[in-house]
Every structure is written in C-alpha cells, then in structure tokens.
C-alpha cells in the first residue's frame, strides 16, 4: 500500500510539473561561444604563455575535437549557422550585421529571419527551458524593428549587440553571472543556454583582477592575456555552478569560437563600441590571438579563419581527456546532433545542411558524409583573404575565386597548415570541387527577404548642384594628402572613426565612407580612397 501511494504521489507531482522522468533525464545543453578566440589561444592547445585552466578542465573531462569548422570567418553569419543548422548564405547573411544603409549596400537583410528554423525553438517545443546570454549580433544596434530573441525560441535573454532600443541588455562581463542564475532557477527542468561571451573581440575591456594577474608581461601581452583569462573565468563560473547544483553529470557543455583571431593593428589607438554602449577599451593592436599554426586569420576562408576550438564534455558519453582528430565537425552539425542528444524528432520539412554526428560525441569514429561549403564576400586583402568560395569534401579542401580563375587545393590531413598547393597535380579533383562549389552557390538566394529589412528611413547623401563653371576638382594627390592626415595611427587603414574625425562637422559622412568602401569590409585602404574618381 505504501509503495502504491508513493507511486501515485510521484505521478501526480510529475503531471503537475509537466515533466516526466524521461524529461528530467534528458541532458541539459550549454553552448559557450567565444568571439575571435583562435584555435591556438588555449594552454591545452600548446600556447606559449596563455593559461586557460577552466577550458583545459573541460578538455580533460571531455573530448577535444581538432577538426571543427565554423561556416564563415566573421561573427554574424557564423552564429546564424550555429543557430539554424543551415548555411548563413541561405538567409543572405554574408558578413556582419551593420547599419541598415551598410546592409543594403552589401545586399544583406537587417536581421536573421525570425521564421528560420532554430535550435532553441526545437528544444523549447519539446519541453526545454531556453535562454540566450551575451552577444547577439544577429542584427545591429542601429537597426530599428528587429525581432527580439524570444522570436527565435528563447524563454529568457539578456544580450549586448542587439537591436536599437532593446531593454534586455547585458554588460560585457555579465554573461556568466546571468547564466549561473538561470541554471539555479531551472535546475529541475531540462534547459538549453547559449552563452556567447565577448572575449576576445574588441574593445578589449579586461578586469582589474586579470590585468593584475598578468602585470609581469609587456602591455600588449598583458591585455590579451587578461582578456583570455576573463573568458576562461566565465567558463569556470558555469562549470562550478553546474557542480554546486548537482547537474554536471547530466549536462552537455561545449566551448567554441565564432571565427579565428583578429589581425593585430600596427599601432594602438583609443576606441569605443557603438554610440549607445559607449564602452571604451583597447583596440586591435592588442589582438594577438594565435591560430595554432593554421593559415589565415579572421575574414579568411583558410583554416586560421574558420577552424576553431570545439570541446565537448558530457559525462558518461564523451570519453574524458580524449582528442578526436579524425571526425570533421561543423557548426551546422550542432542542431541535428544536439536534437538527437535531447531525443527531439526534427520536423519533416526541416532540411539541415549538417548531419547528426552524435556518435562522435559518444566516442565513436565517424566519417562525415556531406561536403562543407563556405562563401566570403568581404575584404580581399592578400595573401589570405582572396578566396570567395571554398569547399571541403573528404580530406580535400579547395579555395577559389568566384570565377574559378584562381584555385588552391589542399589535403587537410597531410597539410593542415595549407602550405602546399596540390592543384596542379590533381586537376580532376579541382574540377570536381569547383563544380560542387559553383552548383552550391547557384542554390543561394540573390537578395534578402523583404520582411527582414528595417522600415526605418535610410539616409542618403543629397545631390549638391555645383555652380556652372566652378566645378571642384579633387585630384588623387589631394586625396593622398588627406588619407595621410586622417590615418592617425599610421597603420595604412582608414577606419570610419578616423574618416569621421577628418571630416568633422560635415554631413552624410558614413554614406560617403561606404561609397569608397568597395569591398564593404568597414575600412578603407589607400587604393580604395585615393583612386576613386568622385568625391
């Protein structure tokens, strides 16, 4: 009789909470996504002086996947891929979200389509509590009318780099504490949390404690080391909270980065973030991230731009302390893999660009069956930013221009550094992969959805009529002199801030800047500025 009463009581409590025993046994999922954090920026990946004890702890208790790629070498499209399980170019997200005016110039929407399939929506519909804390950047702070995170399937959120006027904002160092509070409040439910930390993106705003920790180093190393320590400490807060709440045995924790490390400027300069945040910090001079020997950096389709750390801890599932250097994983694999881990059946009309690689999480040797495609429409700087398309199929990776006139082929097992171009010796492979890349590109939309464009007015520079016979002539020499004056840190790159300072008080400065910015990378080379033929 007592057993019967106990069973009935348990069933009643379970029905009142809406959770079955099976629900409570489903794994919690936490995805920690860093920003501009290089493959080599981990002590467990052999960095010379950086120390990442909490991420190293994650690796020692889980599996370090050494062949993980994101699907774009900059922030916004990389994150869109992780969220949707589909290539970001399918949503016309090719570069980072900027102002609506800049987005129009680059044939981009103003936000990720809120009707896109998303991992949090699938998990929420199956009974998970979902949250997003930290960076958003699936729209821009200047953009009005962007859908809130709730529209993408989140129960709770507190973000930075969100839409204009968003109230649920969070500071750069508030991500981990928000996450810890959500874990404690939802410990009796299966939960999914995106934890998108700021480090190691600019502005670098290290805490005083971390700066003190690295005071023995020169200023450049001190600042970058402190930033990495702050990010690693965030991971530690989350791991400690899981342990305190008795949840670590039933929680999948993943650490990765949205792209490779930023290029380092030649000289330092003061900087701020967007107009609303007014956060002053250190600029890219202090961005001395490490690719671990991989070619290229952020904005490059070579491995240094798209191969990033990916560490998974799932006690009882992922083999502790192991390194998987055979399974090729990508960001679009996360949605089908994590849904499989959570026991979620995906809708029949959902088509992922990735594949379910849950067996790899469980320690099995898995060979991916699908090719991987990349598209890049940003800067074309030599030597490593020229590829517009790339494809990997099996062990071969091809980088190419859109017209296919320049191609480079690499065997990724024998040559992870992409140092020996094997195109000349393998013409059939080049032809096959080139066709695959072109055929894939042909499936992409030619313009963004109209309902993903902000309705706010787009400022356009007025056309000024010049008096007859008094047309102003701006010579290349005049532009060269202006460029030299405005490039205050002498790094041979003109930023929007420097351009604005040079034209202080004039109108429509940003639109003029964008007309010069031919490749839409947010900065002007001397060639772009001096060789223009109109002011």
Image (cartoon, grey):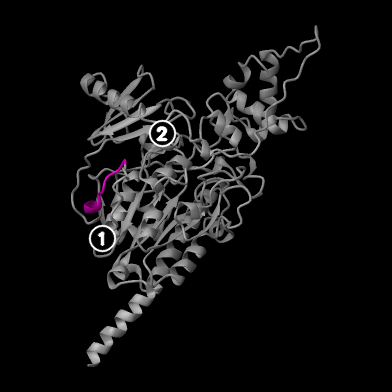
Q: Earlier in the sequence, mark 1 or mark 2?
A: 2
Q: Is residue 225 visible?
A: yes
Up the image or down, 15 lies above or below 324; here it is below
Number of other residues with Cα within 10 Å of mark 2, as a class: few under 14, some 14 to 19, many 20 or more: many
Disc 1, SS = loop
Q: Is residue 488 visible?
A: no
**Residue 526 position in % (x across, y down):** 59, 22
Residue drawn at 41 percent across, 35 percent down: 89
Up the image or down, 177 lies above or below 148; here it is below
Q: Which mark is residue 475?
A: none
Q: Which region of the structure is painted magenta?
A: 353-360
Asked whether residue 259 is drawn in magenta, I would say no
Disc 2, SS = loop
Asked whether residue 358 is drawn in magenta, I would say yes
The overriding secondary structure of the stretch rendered in magenta is loop
Which is nearer the eye, 117 or 412?
Answer: 117
Count of marks placed on residues: 2
Q: Which mark is residue 320?
A: 1
Number of other residues with Cα within 10 Å of mark 1, as a class: few under 14, some 14 to 19, many 20 or more: some
Identify the residue under disc 2. 296
Calculate the distance from the C-alpha at mark 1 to the C-alpha at mark 2: 31 Å
Which is nearer the eye, 324 or 209?
Answer: 324
What residue occupies the far left of the structure in this picture?
365
Q: Are marks 1 and 2 in contact (CB under 8 Å)?
A: no
């Amino acid at each position: 009789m007592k057993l019967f009463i106990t069973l009935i009581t348990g069933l009643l409590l379970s029905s009142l909470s809406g959770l079955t025993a099976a629900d409570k046994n489903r794994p919690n999922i936490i995805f920690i996504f860093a920003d501009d954090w290089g493959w080599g920026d981990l002590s467990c990946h052999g960095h010379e002086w950086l120390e990442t004890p909490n991420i190293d702890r994650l690796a020692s208790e889980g599996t370090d996947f050494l062949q993980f790629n994101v699907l774009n070498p900059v922030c916004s499209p990389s994150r869109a891929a992780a969220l949707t399980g589909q290539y970001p170019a399918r949503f016309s997200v090719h570069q980072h979200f900027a102002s609506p005016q800049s987005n129009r110039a680059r044939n981009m929407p103003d936000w990720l389509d809120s009707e896109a399939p998303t991992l949090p929506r699938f998990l929420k519909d199956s009974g998970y509590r979902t949250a997003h804390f930290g960076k958003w950047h699936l729209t821009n702070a200047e953009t009005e009318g962007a859908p809130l995170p709730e529209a993408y399937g989140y129960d709770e959120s507190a973000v930075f780099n969100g839409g204009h006027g968003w109230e649920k904002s969070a500071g750069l160092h508030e991500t981990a504490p928000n996450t810890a509070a959500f874990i404690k409040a939802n410990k009796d439910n299966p939960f999914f949390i995106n934890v998108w930390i700021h480090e190691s993106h600019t502005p670098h705003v290290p805490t005083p404690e971390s700066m003190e920790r690295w005071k023995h180093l020169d200023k450049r190393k001190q600042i970058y080391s402190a930033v990495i320590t702050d990010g690693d400490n965030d991971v530690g807060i989350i791991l400690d909270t899981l342990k305190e709440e008795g949840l670590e045995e039933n929680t999948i924790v993943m650490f990765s980065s949205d792209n490779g490390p930023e290029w380092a400027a030649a000289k330092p300069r003061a900087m701020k973030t967007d107009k609303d945040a007014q956060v002053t910090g250190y600029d890219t001079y202090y961005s001395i991230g490490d690719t671990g020997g991989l070619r290229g950096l952020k904005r490059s389709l070579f491995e240094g731009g798209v191969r990033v750390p990916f560490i998974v801890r799932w006690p009882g599932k992922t083999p502790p302390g192991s390194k998987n250097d055979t399974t090729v994983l990508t960001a679009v694999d996360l949605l089908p893999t994590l849904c499989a881990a959570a026991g979620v059946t995906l809708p029949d009309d959902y088509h992922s660009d990735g594949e379910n690689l849950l067996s790899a999480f469980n320690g099995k040797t898995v060979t991916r069956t699908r090719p991987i495609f990349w598209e890049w429409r940003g800067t074309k700087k030599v030597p490593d930013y020229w590829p517009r398309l790339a494809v990997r199929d099996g062990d071969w990776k091809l980088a190419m221009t859109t017209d296919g006139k320049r191609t480079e082929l690499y065997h990724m097992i024998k040559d992870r550094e992409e140092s020996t171009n094997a195109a000349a010796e393998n013409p059939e492979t080049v032809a096959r992969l080139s066709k695959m890349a072109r055929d894939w590109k042909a499936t992409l939309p030619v313009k963004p959805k109209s309902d993903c464009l902000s309705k706010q007015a787009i400022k356009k520079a007025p056309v000024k009529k010049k008096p007859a016979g008094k047309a102003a002539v701006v010579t290349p020499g005049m532009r060269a002199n202006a460029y030299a004056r405005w490039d205050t840190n002498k790094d041979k790159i003109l930023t929007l801030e420097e351009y604005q300072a040079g034209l202080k008080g004039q109108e429509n400065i940003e639109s003029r800047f964008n007309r010069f910015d031919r490749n839409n990378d947010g900065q002007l080379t001397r060639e772009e500025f001096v060789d223009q033929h109109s002011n």
